[in-house]
Image (cartoon, grey):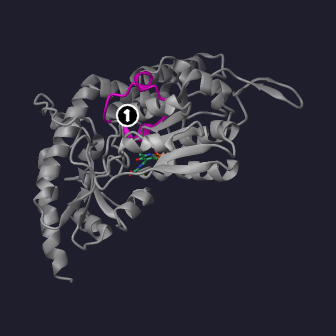
Amino acid sequence: MESGTKENTSFDADKIREHFPIFFQPENEGLIYFDSAATSQRPREVLTACNNFYEKINANAHRGAYKIAEKATAAFEAAREKTAKFIGAGRTEEIIFVRSTTEAINFVAYGWARKFIGVEDEILVTEMEHHSNLIPWQVAAQKTGARLRFLKMNENGVLPLDQLDSLLSRKTKLVAVTHVSNVLGTVNPVKEIIRAAHNVGAKVVVDGAQSVPHLPVDVVDLDADFFAFSGHKMLAPMGIGVLYGKTALLEEMEPVYYGGEMINDVDYYQSTWNDLPWKFEAGTQNIAGAIGLGAAIDFINSIGIDTIREHDHSLTEYALNELKKIKDLVILGPTENRGPAISFTLGNIHAHDLATYLDQKNIAIRSGHHCAKLVMKKFNVAATARASFYLYNTKSEIDALVHALNEAKGYFSKWR
Ligand code: C6P
């Protein structure tokens, strides 16, 4: 998110909330949901789209010649087309449906890296990666004998790019970088990183789990080789995710799963693979999930991703200002050019205690290491509390958080 973006006054988060049934369940009355970085809530439009699939056209895709099977196939492929447009992919077949960001990155690690990376090579990752974009590369390095290297971040949680010259060389075969940090909120200059990586012939996999829900993404403009994201963080169901890959790379990449529908021809001892994207989609897919993702994209488009970005930005700026006023509260990460996830510590109150206290006030935040232990190590903390915002959140909810944090300080001071 760009810093200095003006608040969009025409945006009405209260009206948006009306689309989200979770906020209207009697048992959830007063829920302040500040954990969208973990998973977003889902609007009725998405739930209805999934339900409609099961109620009206439930059949397996790409398998039946009867009417509902053809409708299921058409709806599944229409979702792929919407997804391709949403992230600016040049071709629909560059969109591989997977379960999640984690699975998408593992696809690249198994299908591409194990084939093209060897003992003389290097893989460059950053210190701020989610474990999903770190562990697959640790294991790939161990299996191939390649050297794993790290792009370091500074004390503000920013990646200074002057390190690239000394880290990138003809040995670098792959760079793995998150677009937006789930802990620090940092928006990384992925376009510059990709350009530098391409200059030495390296491919780049971008973890877009925290960017696609919040900012306009154009994979062609970025020139990303692979780009991974999850549906469940952008209003879509759980269990559907996307791996984007450039056609030429997907063509040369090995399938990761073998089985039904990923074949072209099968003989006794060998088989040939289906065209893209189906070569990578073995077995029955999450068709309802893909349709739900399509509906989520429609919902986001009906508001406008730029409008969502402005709203997120205005909430984040407001929250940063208000949180700063709390004595002993330390915010991790940059103050500008950041996504809507804010990690913090409050005195010596453990993040889990804080989250439990806030839950008593109906405020849902995340606490822990956020699957980014290298970030915790870098900042020398065991855990942080994290509040993350999305289109249904409001400034008055942030006021409630700030009020509750001030109360928590008083409450926990009694026990010291
Ligand atoms: N981060 C969070 O609370 P999956 O679980 O595969 O949908 O997404 C993994 C993932 C990968 N990269 C980034 C940057 C992420 O933020 C996440 C998920 C959640 O921060 C759950 S740990």
Residue under label 1: 212
> Relative to 270, does residue 247 appear above or below in the rendering?
above
Furthest-right residue in view? 268
The answer to which image quadrant residue 278 occupies is: top right
Q: Is residue 226 visible?
A: no
Of residues 180 and 243, the one nearer the viewer is 180
Q: Which range is magenta?
A: 214-234
- Where residue 79 appears, x then y in whole percent? 47, 23
Taking the spot 54% from the left edge, 38% from the top edge, the residue there is 169
Tell me the element at label 1. loop
Identity of the residue drawn at 58% across and 17% down: 70
Which amino acid is tagged 1? Val
Residue 157 belongs to the span the image colors magenta = no
Residue 212 location in percent, x, y? 37, 34
Residue closer to the observer: 2 or 103: 2
Residue 233 shown in magenta:
yes
From the image, which quarter does the N terminus lie in? Answer: top left
Could you say where residue 319 lies in the image, as x and y percent from the top left? 16, 50
Label 1: few (<14), some or many (≥20) within 10 Å? many
Residue 168 as seen in the image, left or right of residue 339: right
The quadrant in which the C terminus is found is bottom left
Q: Estimate the x, y position of residue 398 in percent, counting from the top left.
A: 15, 51
The image quadrant of residue 6 is: top left
Q: Residue at x 13, y 74 (%)?
A: 410
